[in-house]
Structure formats: C-alpha cells, structure tokens
Amino acid sequence: MLVINQHNCYIIMNVVKYPLLYLLFAEVVCHVTSTSPHRIVIGPEETLAYNGETVVMKCTVASGLPTWFRVVPGGTDIELSDGTSAANPYQIVGDQSSGEYFLQIPNVQVSDSHTYQCALFNANPAYIQASLTVIARYQLIVKQSFACGRCKNGVGRVVEQEEKLCDEVETVKEFTYLGDK
C-alpha cells in the first residue's frame, strides 16, 4: 500500500507480452474520501399546499451555511437566500445553531409553484431539491337567479368549489367569482 497526500492508494501492474517486446503498465488507484464536515442532513420534500397557506421547506445541515434557490429550468437559478437572510417575501426560519435553515414562504400563490433547492458549498451531495405545488381554491357566491325550485342546498350562500351545490340543477344562470380564498 502506498500513501499519497494522506490517501490510501495501491498500484496495479500489468505485463503484456508481445513477440520480442514486454510492456509494463502501472496504474495507481487511490480511494479518496471527503473529510469535509459539510453535508445536508435533511433536505426539502415534495410539498402540496393551497393558496394563502404558509409553507416551510426544510434544510438541516451538519455544518456550513446553505443557500436557497428557486430552480429555473434551462436558465439561471434564482438565489433566494444567502444563508441567514432571504429576499422578501421569503424568510429563513428554524434553529440555526442546530443547522436548521428552513425556507418559509408566506401566503403562497399558484405562481410560487416551482422547484426549490437547498445548496451547500463543498458538500456531497451539493444540493437537494423538491417541488412545491400550490393549488388554487375558489369561492363562489350563488345568487338568487340560480334558484330553479329543485335545489336542496339553498341559494344565496357562499360555497366552496369542492362542495356539491345542488342535486338536480342542470345549469347555473349567474355566479360571482370572488377570487382566491
């Protein structure tokens, strides 16, 4: 065994015999292990949220200062934090003395649906990324013109998109979109 730059190495020697010629090939193989204490212990996970909610994407490191990015496919990723501070409206939360550098996104909207990346310089792996998908919830106000005489749920009240409005109504004559809930 050979030691080169504090790495364990060994030499593989091969002899190839040709008529009137012997060739000696030597190959040095070293096993290099990272001695860097920098590593991502817990990375972000795929997240599903409704608009208006606050989302926290986790990143816990053994040591070092991670940076958060929003991934831009085919382009330059957008840096959201330099480790301890973040661009508005993003915030870095968590117990940083324990290596927690969580990215908090308040009041998420559908436009926040992206892949986010926690990156750590000199770590292996260098980053962990996950997607955030934001689903819109809508609110309808059913007006009196909706009444058809057969609606069992009533009229003139606020309902959620997922709720069944009426058992037997075939068409809605008028409704008002109030925007995202």
Image: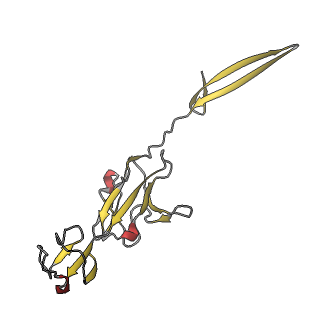
Q: Nearer the viewer, residue 3 or 131?
A: 131
Q: How many marks?
A: 0
- Asked whether 149 or 72 is in front, the reply is 149
Q: Is any atom of residue 179 visible in this view?
A: yes
Compared with residue 37, is residue 164 higher up or lower down, i.e. above or below? below
Q: Residue at x 12, y 73 (%)?
A: 153
Q: Classify residue 146 as left or right of residue 99.
A: left
Q: Residue furthest right?
A: 20
142 in relation to 44, above or below: below
Residue depicted at 40% across the width and 70% down the height: 111
Q: Residue at x 44, y 43 (%)?
A: 37
Nearer-the-camera pick, 78 or 67: 78
Q: Position of residue 56 (x, y in %)?
A: 31, 60
Q: Is residue 48 left or right of residue 156?
A: right
Residue 13: percent from left, percent from top: 70, 19
Q: Picture coordinates of residue 147 (x, y %)?
A: 16, 82
**Where the C terminus falls, by quadrant?**
bottom left
Q: Quadrant of residue 57?
A: bottom left
Q: Decide if residue 179 is on the left or right side of residue 117.
A: left
Find residue 1 and report its horizontal and vertical position in percent.
Answer: 60, 21
